[in-house]
Image (spheres, rainbow, N blue to C red):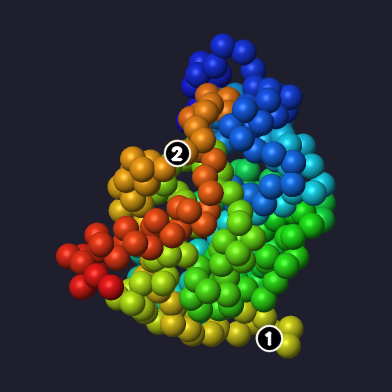
Amino acid sequence: MSELTSIEKISRPNTTASLIRDLKALGLQKGDVVIAHASLSALGWIAGREMAVIDALLAVLEPEGTLIMPSQSGENSDPQYWENPPVPESWWEEIRANMPPFDPDRTPTRAMGKIVDALLSYPGRIRSNHPQVSFCGVGPLASEILADHVLSPGLGKGSPLQKLYDHQAKILLLGVGYGNCTSLHLPESQLDNVSWYQSGASVSIDGKAQWISFEEIEYDDDDFEALGNDYEKIHQVCQGYVGAALCRYIDMQELCDFGLNWLKQHRGDKHGSAV
């Protein structure tokens, strides 16, 4: 979206103060534990852009609250699976041998958005140590939630998603839909009929880059929008506008519990027999 289009979406500029008002009206409160999935362009023009969004979120949560966001680095992966774009097979070994190892302080995200990148630059932020599906955050529970991120499954038990669930976190869909809700991969990982594949990434071992291989789930978010639509038919969801974007504030445990049962019932044709 062009800057002109984002200006035309609103009648007056968004500011940190206006975003604070909108977030409070949506239901965010002091002390909440929040995992946010966000699109900057959906919010309309903002004075201060992505930093204003982070400042507004942290102002509402105050020091007692914790903000977590996905900070995935999908480029640090086995090139044989790359599709957007693919690379020649003759390149694969050279890419694996020369991929820089994951560094929570230096590795950039891939296609995660400018709001996540702003959080990564925030003083005191913490990032988990998964080479592909890390999370970052700030707040008093960030260290506990992001520590010891298991390698496989990266979005399942032992991941920050499980810890967020255990801490009764809230999910903030800030200008995005359920298709962008990374949190739904947690119930997906609990299905008995998930498919696995041999993944790989470059990590630092004793200060040197080393390519490692590990089993990972073939995560699939194609039906998350349908799941979310069905969830809203029977559960009340806090909805409201933050800037120009319709946003949702959702109880993570409730959505994930519903999601597990929904996925068991609806993935039979595509993924084998339902659990």
> Which numbered mark, 2 or 1, is in the foreground of this view?
2
**Which element type, helix, strand or loop, lies under badge 2?**
loop
62 to 133, vertically: above or below:
above
What type is the residue that disc 1 sits on? Ile
Q: Where, quadrant-wise, is the C terminus in this rendering?
A: bottom left
- Mark 2 lies on residue: 236
Kindly identify which numbered label has been placed on residue 223. Answer: none
Q: Residue furthest bottom?
A: 206
**Which element type, helix, strand or loop, lies under badge 1?**
strand
Q: CA distance from mark 2 to mark 1?
A: 47 Å
Q: Compare marks 2 and 1 and give the one earlier in the sequence.
A: 1
Q: Depth check: 68 or 74 in front?
A: 68
Q: Is residue 109 visible?
A: no
Answer with the quarter of the image where residue 159 lies: bottom right
Residue depicted at x 48% and y 76%: 153
Q: Position of residue 19 (x, y in %)?
A: 66, 28
Answer with the quarter of the image where residue 188 lies: bottom left
Packing grade of label 2 (10 A; few <14, some 14-19, many >=20) is: few
What type is the residue that disc 2 sits on? Gln
- Mark 1 lies on residue: 205
Q: Position of residue 181 (x, y in %)?
A: 47, 51
Q: Position of residue 104 (x, y in %)?
A: 69, 66
